[in-house]
Amino acid sequence: MTGKTLTILGIETSCDETAAAVVRGTSPGPGEILSSIVASQAGAHAPYGGVVPEIASRAHLEILDAVIERAIAGAGIAPGEIDGIAATAGPGLIGGVMVGLTTAKGVALGLGKPLIAVNHLMGHALTARLTQGTEFPFLLLLVSGGHCQLLGVGGLDDFRLYGSTIDDAAGEAFDKVAKLLGLAYPGGPEVEKLAAQGNPRAYDLPRPLVTGHNIRKTADFSFSGLKTAVRLLTERQTVKTEDVCASFQAAVIDILTDRTRTAMAMFERDFLREQRPGKVGAAAVLPTQKNDASGFPSGRATQQKRLVVAGGVAANRAIGQALARLCGAEAFALAVPPPVLCTDNAAMIAWAGLERLAAGGGDALGVSPRARWPLSA
């Protein structure tokens, strides 16, 4: 199906958003989002300060059919015009994944269309292709409530892991710190809002695994110690909440930028070296870089050095600005999807399904859901 315009229905139920979307386009993008419906469960989980898997799966079961109907109606197409059904098959909360994947199987069988079982992380990874047509290869920083990874992406089947969290994910740390401070759930946006009003140097918080302390020589992350430092700080003294949020966010930014800088060197080593006779490992010549109005590298730049930032934490403006400065210093083009596509949604799942179907991929109706499903082999 290479070169053919495809229309794909996507279904996402890996955590606490029940989502369906219809996208249309041709790989590598950009594509068109015909509809995108996201039903949040935040209110149901707020009393618990986090996602309760049983509540999440029951909510998916109750509303998913209606969400799918709204997505198809909103796209203004007949069901028969859909070329394939893409659904998150993992990783995620297994109950929710089962609901979405089983529903997708029924829709695919009823319409006589291909089923594409999508890795949720691939959905995030390819969003910049949906929105900006970002070409392979690129370095991916995936930062969300459940995941924190740096990967080199050379294609649909070429993901090279440079670093991941050895404990908490960045978004998880934001939510846990918010809970320690008595802030509303979800905590990440609340911490970001208060951090803008505080002093980022008010409290000296640790930066685990940053350069100089990274004996592992990897691009791994660690946020558990930072979270614990915030807990000890609030237990031992009276604190100003805005300053704690600002100091915590500053520490997260330092960790993310340090680890990303390390991964940039790994990415250049793996993807941007020309193999010439007598010059193995010689640096490739890069086309001239283009900057956007902000002065930072544009996600549409023609050069080969690209950083894609995806996942819910990518919606944090302070983090985005810090990564833009890093890309400016390291001559990387930066691509960040719009905030609404950084958090979990079905448009990214539909697009990943479109790319896989265009490349000849598809799955049998017997495909199983997975609680864990790493992108890299």
Image (cartoon, grey):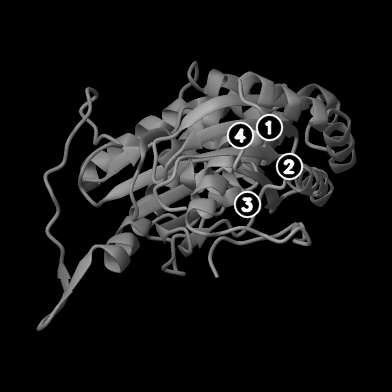
Q: Are marks 2 and 1 in contact (CB under 8 Å)?
A: yes
- State the separation of the CA atoms marked 4 and 2: 10 Å
163 versus 32 height, above or below: below
Quarter of the image with the C terminus in it: bottom right
Residue 114, which numbered label? none
- Label 3 sits on a secondary structure element that is strand
Residue 65 appears in which quarter of the rendering?
top right
Residue at 20% of width from left, 47% of height from top?
Answer: 303
Residue at 46% of width from left, 69% of height from top?
Answer: 216
Q: Are marks 1 and 4 in contact (CB under 8 Å)?
A: yes
Three-letter amino acid code of the residue under disc 2: Leu
> Is residue 304 left or right of 195 when viewed as pictured?
left
Residue 81, which numbered label? 4
Q: Are marks 3 and 1 in contact (CB under 8 Å)?
A: no
Q: Tell me which numbered mark, 2 or 1, is placed earlier along the sequence.
A: 1
Which residue is tagged 3? 118
Three-letter amino acid code of the residue under disc 4: Glu
- State the separation of the CA atoms marked 3 and 1: 20 Å
Which residue is tagged 1? 79
- Label 4 sits on a secondary structure element that is helix
Residue 186 appears in which quarter of the rendering?
top right
Residue at 80% of width from left, 51% of height from top?
Answer: 94
Label 2 Cα crowd, 10 Å radius (few <14 / some 14-19 / many 20+): some
Image coordinates of residue 31 in percent, x first then y, are 44, 34
